[in-house]
Image (tube, rainbow, N blue to C red):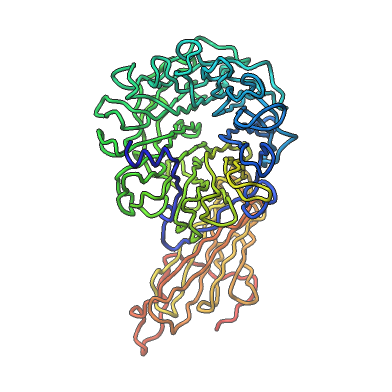
Amino acid sequence: MNRKHALWRAGLGLLLAAALLGSGSVAAESSAIKPLAAPLGTSGAIRLTQMGPDGDASYVATSPAIAYNPLADEHLLVWAADDNQAGLVDGEFEIYGQRLAADGTPILGRFRISTMGIDGDPSGEARSPAVAYSTNQNTFIVVWSGIPGGTDLEREVYGQLVSADGSLVGGMVRISQTGPANVSAQGAFHPDVVHNRNLDEFLVVWDGDHVADGAHEIYGQRLDGNLTLLGTNQAISEMGSDSNSSACFGEHPAVAYDRDVNQYLVVWDGQDDRNGLVAGESEVFGQLLSGTGALASPPLRISSMGPDGDTDWAAWRPDVAYSATTNEYLVVWAGDDPGDYGNGPLVDGEFEIYGQRLAANPLLEVGVDDFRISAAGPDGNWAYDAFHPQVQARSEGWIVVWRGDDDGSWDGGDPVKESYEVFAQDLSLDGTPLEQGLQRISRMGSAEGDSAYWADRPTLVLTNDCFETALVVWHGVDDLPGLHVGEIEVYGWNAQPRPILDLAIASSPESLCPSWNLYLQATLRNTTACPLSEVYLDASWGADLCCPVDATSNPVAGILDPSEHSMRWAIGALGPGESTEIRIELHTLSGHVDEHLFRVVFSAGANEMLEIRQSRSKSIADNSLCPDAAEPTITPTPTIELQTPRLALPLVMK
């Protein structure tokens, strides 16, 4: 195993950095992040589980998954954990569930979902849960990889229906049939599940070595709304030229459903030795399935990390989502690639998050090939990584979350190196990372950079409100009162996945002689499907600017602050997709040296916004543009034209 793969297996992390924030006259803004409730301790993370007594690191909660019930406006959180209650013992992992309100507040208490073997016997276990919601039946399906225990040590995929109120419906159902009966050397791992609302069915996918020990492939099974198996296990992948060889394999499947044409896309990472690839070279692959589970197209290789035939470059742990807006899929993964992405070439072992858009019908790649989403630490430094991405589709784009470490340069904050945290990036429909769509979601531990406290395995779900709020959950270690170092629990944060009021600034001229006029235009746009109320815009400036002139074309008059260093426009309501423009003229005072910056800060907000949006303009003093002293001072013709001034308060010219 080469150095890069060894680091990945050990779990070295990730992050994204300043490269995605861009540069220019618009400054980065603070992220619009809203906690689920009042933060506990100093971390800002909201704890959602309590497994075993506090202070005992023997009991942990891991691998959270979450689904949304739009009928009740609630979530179901599930996770794998061991506990000391009801006759259970340390190391006896089962699947648990917790209902959450739309904002993540727990509803009632947790409940147990799986029963693998006899309580008190740790030879039985349940791991790697996944969950999906059925709008048809108003129920959830929870699936996991489990071992019954005792004399039966065969790992298979199981499922359980859970009602909207958290009660179990019927009993556990065994979904996979892997290899010979009761052979522990072959098993089924890493299940994922999605609901088909057209047929009221579920599709469960997993990787398993049905044919030979270690020769993992991807399999699937359809179930009806009552968890009755429809047909038999379906082979989805066929990796490598020899199906009996463990040198080539498929792992870590994820599945999305396209309700428009009633089809599924299953993606996975794997190794193949055909079409220029070699064993040991991991890439991401995909396969379309019809609504009835049949293979609907040839398999598609999705990622291209590094040159073919070179095992130093790889793609791991993909996820996939479907957008009904564009009839496209977005596949994301963690990978390392030698390409130059604007800040310098990357190096072996430098994992980042990548994405690929796919047209749904027929299945083919569209847009930028293997576009980069994250920027963890300085380019060219393999010590900073990004891993475990998850993606969800929005009406106007995508949101991707992952965990990682970084040098802190992206927001001017403290470094989080070796202290993995959860990050989110908002993307436009074409996959472009939005400048102000980057958020740091978790803050584990009271001291930045302390590797004893960390976050991992994030996942998310979107509500159906018009702001498409994301509930992000993960497992990790925090230093809340009473907890012990190494005590892993599940945490969450309710985060708005995108700015809900876009603010763009244009200014002219960029270079000017001090004493010229400065012309500015702010454009505000409501990017949500909801109306925004009490929308306002503020502009503020320093003592090097004076004498604001408000444009008559503005929808409302600006109100000048008595200090004459700021002005506010009370715009009122903005409907979904609506925009408005505000224009202002300022006078630059003379006597400033070359390269002096004239700055104007714009801030926008609305009643529905969690935090204000902020951008700024800057123009540079250039005395070479000034006329001779004997000639009169001139004002250049503005690029942004203003009309006759219209002010709410009289101005005194200085």
Out of 74 and 126, give the one closest to the viewer: 126
Out of 360 and 530, give the one closest to the viewer: 360
In the orientation shown, which residue stands out farthest toward the right? Answer: 108
Residue 87 placement, left or right of 288: right
Residue 503 placement, left or right of 34: left
Q: Quadrant of residue 10?
A: top left
On-image quarter of the C terminus: bottom right
Residue at 62% from the left image edge and 50% from the top image edge: 479
Note whether 70 is above or below 529 in the view shown.
above
Residue 407 placement, left or right of 468: left
Note whether 500 is above or below 26 in the view shown.
above
Say whether residue 41 is visible: yes
Percent of width and height locating residue 617 = 47, 66
On-image quarter of the N terminus: top left
Q: Quadrant of residue 465?
A: top right
Count of marks, rendered view = 0
Say whether residue 67 is visible: no
Percent of width and height locating residue 350 = 36, 46
Note whether 613 is above or below 388 in the view shown.
below
Out of 356 and 221, give the one closest to the viewer: 221
Percent of width and height locating residue 278 = 27, 29
Percent of width and height locating residue 433 = 44, 47
